[in-house]
Amino acid sequence: MKIAFVVQRYGLEVNGGAEFHCRLVAEHLSKYFDVEVLTTCAIDYKTWKNDYPEGVETLNGVLVRRFPVDYERDLLKFNKFSEKIFGNIHTYEDEVEWMKLQGPYSTKLLNYIKSNEKDYTCFIFFTYLYCTTFFGFPLVKEKALLVPTAHDEPPIYLSIFNSLFKCPRRFIYNTEEEKSFVISKFRVSNIPSDIVGVGIDIPDNIDATSFSKKYNLDDFVIFVGRVDESKGCQDLFDYFLRYKKEKKSSIKLVLLGKQTMQVPKNPDILSLGFVPEQDKFDGIKSAKLLIMPSKYESLSMVLLESWLCNTPVLVNGKCDVLRGQCIRGNAGLYYENYDEFEACLEILLANDGMRNAMGKNGMKFVLQNYSWENIEKKYISILKEIDSRN
């Protein structure tokens, strides 16, 4: 079997989101199938600038075909057009134009998919939101599976996605909440589907004390991911600083990840940027807890990583997926406003026994549901069934 993964960007520099998810699955399935990745030359999701060279390379044992993006994204124009789309009456054609402005649009990639359909047993498209899926999926819909990474966000209510979500031969969901949302929104209970998710890899040895010594930190909570307003970071900063103002606490907030917004200049908030993977896991292990303030997630890999480090979590309860993960894992608390944030943080910081119990619950939950052995078995079963019906 020859499997094509289609995703908007792909590389070792892309270490989060659906793109990272795609890379992990592609690498693990390459042990069993002939796997190729079809993607663009872009690294930066804001501009889609062609940073990688066009052509073929092998990355961690997976053949990657890169195609140039036709044009970079004009963020000012895109944001202005988005205001028109989401705030006013508009046409279907306006929505298609919005998608083209969203990017990344690659004529060469789309032509390759169309011309080489017969060479592949099936195509697995990652995330519904970008041009690679929106324009590429219909070209091979008889052979196409969709990992939608869908959640309740403004773009998914655009009418252009109604037909897209009717196309897949099969859905591969991340969580029960994602499946329920997609079925409710698009009425696609008739399309076969599986809840799979992704496995998690962590270093063999995680040392909390080394992180504390290296960065001179010993009493902190941690956020891991893109430091961005869309990830709920502004609310996190506001809530945390208010908490510090109202409470006598030495706790600090440590941020690990690329910074795309202004971080308050405050001695209790430390933005360390990108750190080595070992440092990331050592930091999560060393933290009192991990905070995930995002409203929009289809599966939080950071939560799974945190639990494998025996670290409990505090999440935005307005995100059904995060709340569901916490409830099923019995490994974290959730909030929907400042008062709840304050109460949950206070409880967790004051109760070592509760944090330790939640951390252990989280590790057990991940090992039972998100081991690579289980994930691989699910994908192998899906792909063999697809092959048998071709």
Image: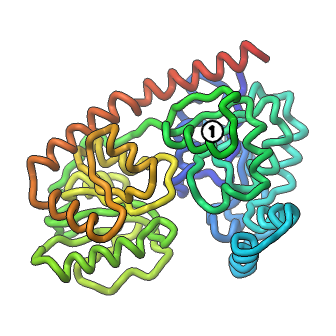
Horizontal placement of 289 versus 191: left or right? left
Q: Find residue 15 and report its horizontal and vertical position in percent.
A: 50, 54
Name the quadrant of the C terminus.
top right
Identify the residue shown where x is 80% and y is 45%.
163
| Location of residue 251 with respect to 209 vertically, above or below | below
The residue under label 1 is 183
User: What secondary structure is found at the residue carrying circle 1?
Assistant: helix
Q: How many marks?
A: 1
Identify the residue shown where x is 75% and y is 71%.
85
Image quadrant in which you'd find residue 202 = top left
Q: Find residue 316 and report its horizontal and vertical position in percent.
A: 38, 59
Identify the residue shown where x is 53% and y is 44%.
21
Q: Residues within 10 Å of mark 1 (few under 14, many from 20)?
A: some
Q: Find residue 171 and report its horizontal and vertical position in percent.
A: 65, 34
| Location of residue 143 with respect to 100 vertically, above or below | above
Closest to the observer: 365 or 182? 182
Closest to the observer: 361 or 257? 361
Name the quadrant of the N terminus.
top right
Identify the residue shown where x is 34% and y is 28%.
368
| Location of residue 248 with respect to 353 vertically, above or below | below
Name the kind of residue labelled 1 in the image: Ile
Horizontal placement of 57 versus 246: left or right? right
Note whether residue 73 is visible: yes
Note whether residue 279 is visible: no
